[in-house]
Image (cartoon, rainbow, N blue to C red):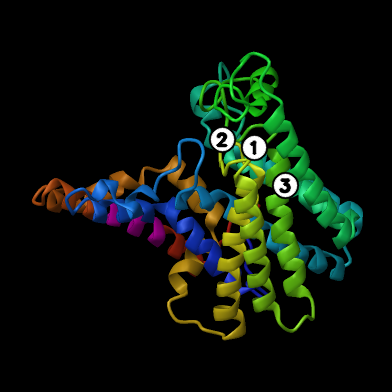
């Protein structure tokens, strides 16, 4: 669906979403290619952070997905209030929530190649599906519970998930560490209940039980959006203070329940939530409080069509377009420089497609 109005938008949300999604669009590849220009650069800390951690631990790229879900959460209090102000009934709001979740599930199936690979052994778990379901549950909680009740619910969800994953191991992996790839209950549930194949054969990072803590990630964004909508005066310092508290609690919790994106561990929710909240606070202060507009277009173009670029890169070979224009020049360069040139071309092509849509005021909204 398209939307032609950009009124009443938080610029900070579009810019922050654009910053987040540019690493999905290929900027992480540029950083890796630059590091590779130098001896041992592939092992540099900056380069390593452009990949995902295999299991326990946290690299920068592990923050991209939960931050996007956090941002989606921020938007809902504004969207909900807008719907009510336009006369929407609760049943109409519910239908929109369920329709959005269903559409994201469908797009997730398509992203995984359901039409391309057939129905023999598809992968049904997906990033978009996780976003749709976690956001849906968080939105329903937002509508039906008070702020205090939702805070308590979030705490119970994280605590219950910790107790389940930490102390219940997979029955089919007797003796294995319940926090290991083979022994965790999260993967076991997917092996028992999910049709098709799992991403890691015995485990899927976007599986069923992970929706529980991911819901809290979306709820954290909704708490933030609700707070920004309030008349409280000292918003930025308060959000930064809350981020510090979340980080401290998350780091302490990680001593028993390690930070793990694949498991979406409770400590991961808090630590990455702290990062997301701090970064949004900075963005909000710069672009909505101080009204700074310079250098924002690059991020806005991405942030206002984030789902578009996520899907488009799966369906269209941007690399071929880059090679079409830059292939001959790249052959004149050393391998590392050629890789950098082609990656810059890839990102440029992707951004120009989004810019064309931006100039035509065409935005894919789900």
Q: Is residue 86 left or right of residue 158?
A: right
Say which element carries label 3: helix
Residue contact at pointers 2 and 1, CB within 8 angstroms:
yes
- Mark 1 or mark 3, which is nearer to you? 3
242 versus 195 height, above or below: below
Q: Name the residue under label 2.
A: 110
Can residue 1 be seen in this snapshot? Answer: no
Q: What stretch is highlighted in magenta?
A: 343-352
Q: Which one is in front, 196 or 83? A: 196
Q: In this view, does 17 lie to the left or right of 366?
A: left
Q: In this view, does 28 lie to the left or right of 191?
A: left
Mark sitting on residue 361: none
Residue 162: quadrant of the picture: top right
- Mark 2 or mark 3, which is nearer to you? 3
Give me the C-alpha separation between circle 2 and circle 3: 23 Å
Q: Mark 3 points at which residue?
A: 215
Q: Position of residue 171 (x, y in %)?
A: 68, 15
Identify the residue shown where x is 35% and y is 56%: 347
Q: Earlier in the sequence, mark 1 or mark 3?
A: 1
Q: Name the residue under label 1.
A: 106
Say which element carries label 2: helix
Q: Position of residue 241 (x, y in %)?
A: 66, 71
Q: Where is residue 3 in the image (x, y as percent from the top left)?
A: 64, 63
Category of crowding for the residue at label 1, using alpha-carbon neighbours closer than 10 angstroms: few (below 14), some (14–19), many (at least 20): some
Quadrant for the N terminus, please. bottom right
């Amino acid at each position: 669906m398209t939307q032609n109005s950009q009124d009443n938008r938080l610029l900070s949300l579009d810019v922050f979403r654009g910053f987040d999604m540019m690493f999905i669009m290929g900027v992480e590849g540029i950083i890796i290619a630059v590091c590779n220009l130098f001896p041992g650069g592939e092992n540099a800390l900056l380069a390593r952070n452009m990949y995902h951690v295999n299991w326990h631990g946290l690299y920068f790229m592990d923050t991209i997905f939960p931050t996007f879900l956090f941002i989606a959460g921020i938007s809902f209090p504004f969207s909900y209030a807008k719907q009510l102000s336009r006369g929407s009934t609760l049943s109409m709001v519910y239908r929109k929530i369920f329709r959005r979740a269903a559409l994201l599930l469908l797009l997730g199936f398509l992203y995984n190649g359901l039409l391309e690979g057939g129905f023999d052994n598809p992968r049904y778990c997906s990033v978009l599906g996780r976003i749709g379901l976690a956001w849906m549950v968080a939105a329903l909680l937002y509508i039906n519970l008070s702020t205090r009740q939702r805070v308590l619910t979030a705490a119970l969800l994280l605590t219950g998930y910790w107790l389940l994953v930490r102390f219940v191991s997979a029955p089919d992996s007797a003796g294995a560490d319940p926090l290991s790839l083979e022994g965790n209950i999260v993967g076991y549930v997917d092996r028992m209940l999910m049709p098709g194949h799992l991403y890691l054969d015995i485990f899927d990072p976007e599986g069923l039980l992970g929706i529980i803590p991911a819901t809290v990630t979306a709820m954290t964004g909704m708490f933030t959006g609700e707070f920004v909508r309030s008349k409280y005066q000292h918003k930025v310092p308060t959000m930064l203070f809350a981020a510090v508290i979340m980080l401290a609690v998350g780091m302490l919790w990680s001593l028993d329940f390690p930070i793990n994106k694949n498991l979406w561990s409770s400590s991961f929710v808090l630590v990455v939530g702290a990062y997301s909240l701090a970064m949004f606070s900075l963005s909000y202060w710069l672009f909505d409080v101080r009204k700074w507009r310079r250098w924002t277009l690059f991020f806005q173009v991405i942030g206002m069509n984030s789902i578009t670029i996520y899907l488009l890169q799966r369906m269209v070979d941007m690399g071929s377009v880059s090679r079409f224009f830059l292939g001959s020049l790249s052959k004149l360069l050393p391998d590392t420089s050629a890789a950098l040139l082609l990656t810059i071309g890839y990102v440029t092509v992707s951004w120009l497609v989004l810019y064309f849509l931006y100039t035509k005021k065409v935005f894919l909204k789900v």
